[in-house]
Amino acid sequence: MKQTALWARMLRLTAILALTVTSAAHARLPVFEALDSASGHPTRFAQCPQFFVDGKPPAIPARPKLRELCYEAFAILHSGETRTPVYVAQRLNRQSIEDADEKRATKFFADARLPRGERAELEDYKRSGYSRGHMAPAGDMPTPTAMAQSFSLANMVPQDIQHNGGAWAKIEQDTRRYIRRAKGDVFVITGPVFTPESPHIGNNGVRVPAYLFKLVYDQHDNRAWAHWQENREEERVGRPITYEELVKRTGVEFLPRLAGSQPN
């Protein structure tokens, strides 16, 4: 099957800069290195463009150890430097959310498509004090295969345990609630944001994000907003930020085809 082929296939190394901010109080635009045609290309996701608006992934320049991973229900741009996703992209709608009633998987695994020197391992999270936080939530998965794939460590970041089960879980639930009412497809991009002080866990040095973001774009209404959360126990759900503010904080046009005409 086509989906099985996508799941089994290693995608080529591509280019991106991991998102970075320099202050917990005020996120600044990161300094991006110039794109070097000899070292990489903008991301393409040729095997799974359906997870991006108009099939066009976020416009991010080249960095080493970046790999595109396609799964049945989501796509990941993975960093071998942080050993986490840079972002995870989903395309959701009312039907997919209604189908997302699968029995929750319990088996986390390291994705064998990633070289050992670029991926997190199960041992990295043990006794770390952090949970394995899904970027594409298990609760969004519409099939048993998608559910199992969502437990790939490539889809995880080290997340504060209370935050994962508290404010972040509510954001995921609220997003699903919105999608059930939406008139068409809703694109969701989720990812970590690091600071220079972000710690590491495990022997492989998995980076712990300072912040997490979840961008929601309703294609039918041309409406976008983002949740911006500090990765800490006391974090609460606040008002979403605008798409423009997310771009300002990260320096990334996550919806490149809309750059000239910002969503509402």
Image (spheres, helix red, strand yellow):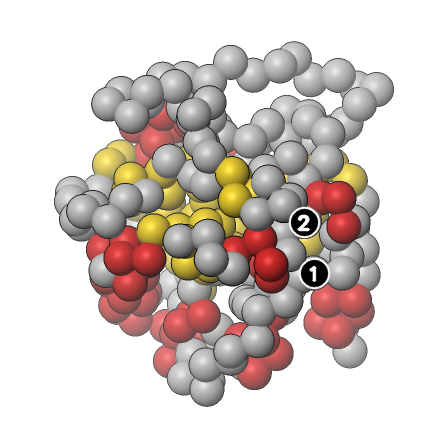
* Dot 1 or dot 2, earlier in sequence: 1
Judging by the rendered image, the residue that carries numbered circle 2 is 119
Q: Residues within 10 Å of mark 2 (few under 14, many from 20)?
A: many
Residue in view at x 68 percent, y 53 percent: 69
Please give left or right for residue 33 compared with residue 187 in the image.
right
Residue in view at x 47 percent, y 57 percent: 127
Residue 85 lies, in percent from the top left, at 56, 46
Q: Which residue is the extreme one toward the right?
A: 38
* Contact, mark 1 vs mark 2 (Cβ under 8 Å): yes
Please give left or right for residue 234 compared with residue 1 in the image.
left
Q: Could you tell me the amino acid type at mark 2?
A: Arg
Residue 223 lies, in percent from the top left, at 30, 45
Q: Which residue is the extreme one toward the front?
A: 127
**243 or 110: which is nearer to us?**
110
Q: Where is the N terminus found, in terms of image quarters?
A: bottom right
The numbered dot on residue 111 is 1
Q: Marks 1 and 2, how far apart in space?
A: 8 Å
Asked if residue 183 is positioned above or below residue 41 in the image, the reply reads below
Please give left or right for residue 102 compared with residue 122 in the image.
left
Residue in view at x 33 percent, y 57 percent: 161
**Res 102 visible:** yes
